[in-house]
Amino acid sequence: MVANPGGGSTDAGGGPVRHIPVLLDEVIEALAPAPGKLILDGTFGAGGYSSAILAAGAEVIALDRDPTAIAAGQAMVAAHGGRLRLVHSQFSHLADHAPQGGLDGVVLDIGVSSMQIDEAERGFSFQKSGPLDMRMSAEGVSAADVVNRAKVADLIRIFHFLGEESQAPRIAHAIEKRRAEKPFETTRDLAGLIELVTPRKMKDKIHPATRVFQALRIFVNDELGELAQALFAAETVLKPGGRLVVVTFHSLEDRIVKKFFSDRAGKASGSRHLPIAHERAATFAAIGKPMVSASEAEAEINPRARSAKLRAGLRTDAAAEAADMSLFGFPNLASLGKLGG
């Protein structure tokens, strides 16, 4: 979901860089913050979007599931005299922290932040040895739990669907064989096995473990489910004329956002082989281009922006639709949680 999902980000001198907000100008243009407006930033991170929104005069409710981000953001809260409220929460629960139908905007930057990747103890990166963790909230099932206890068939599904890894069966069976001798504990331990099983070829642009690490991170944090629920929640809390702006970094995420806005644009219901049951009122109208990507200049400065896509919608006065997860057509991989069963 980032330019190098399992790796780290570096500056020109080879050192780590802190999180740089992607498509910042485009996000602010689509969000249109102004004095008197209330905006929810569902992915606070290092506060890049929130800072720009506050600078435009709006008030901000910011959420983050990562307790370290909440702690680091307290100085920013103090500096803005009550205009910023920072809440430790998953963005799928954003409706619990905002007035119903009272928000002027919601912005979501989906995926892991550069800060999390660069902290070895979080276990997101195989570039630095650390515990095989990957939990954004520091709670629940870890990546090590999945790798060491999930059934092989489940590992194959996770790697194939969430990582789009063509060698998923080979890698999963190799993991099963190795964990019977010794459980996986570190990021480099797992990355090393994957590299042995699927050696890097000269033409490969990414490390062989990149897709598996991406898949594990998405699964551990239920990122696709979180995104889908956040879109449904945003629909209920935005007032007519409110704006929903979403930045994604992976085809699976973008597909979810695209399907949501397409469905909410208003269309006839029912099968194409049967009479139309009724016309549905649009709950969102498009803002600008259907999709905006980063400029070459931004991608050069911030490699994380290379795969970024922005989609935005303007809330109409139509009643919110039902939150139907079947809209997105992806398997409920969260149900694989009975590890080792």
Image: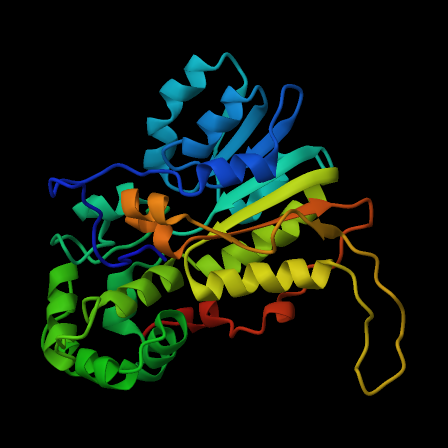
Above or below, 34 against 312 in this view is: above
Q: Is residue 104 left or right of residue 281?
A: left
Residue 169 rendering spot, x and y as whole percentages: 28, 85
Residue 199 rendering spot, x and y as whole percentages: 12, 78
Residue 152 rendering spot, x and y as whole percentages: 30, 82
Residue 41 rendering spot, x and y as whole percentages: 52, 36
Above or below, 183 against 14 in this view is: below
State the residue in front, 315 or 11.
Answer: 11
The answer to whether residue 198 of the structure is visible from this angle is: yes
Q: Is residue 6 left or right of residue 196?
A: right
Q: Is residue 131 left or right of residue 218?
A: left
What residue sits 74% from the left and 58% below the top? 265
The number of numbered badges drawn on the structure is 0
What residue sits 35% from the left and 70% below the top? 163
What residue sits 44% from the left and 36% below the top? 44
Above or below, 107 against 247 in this view is: above
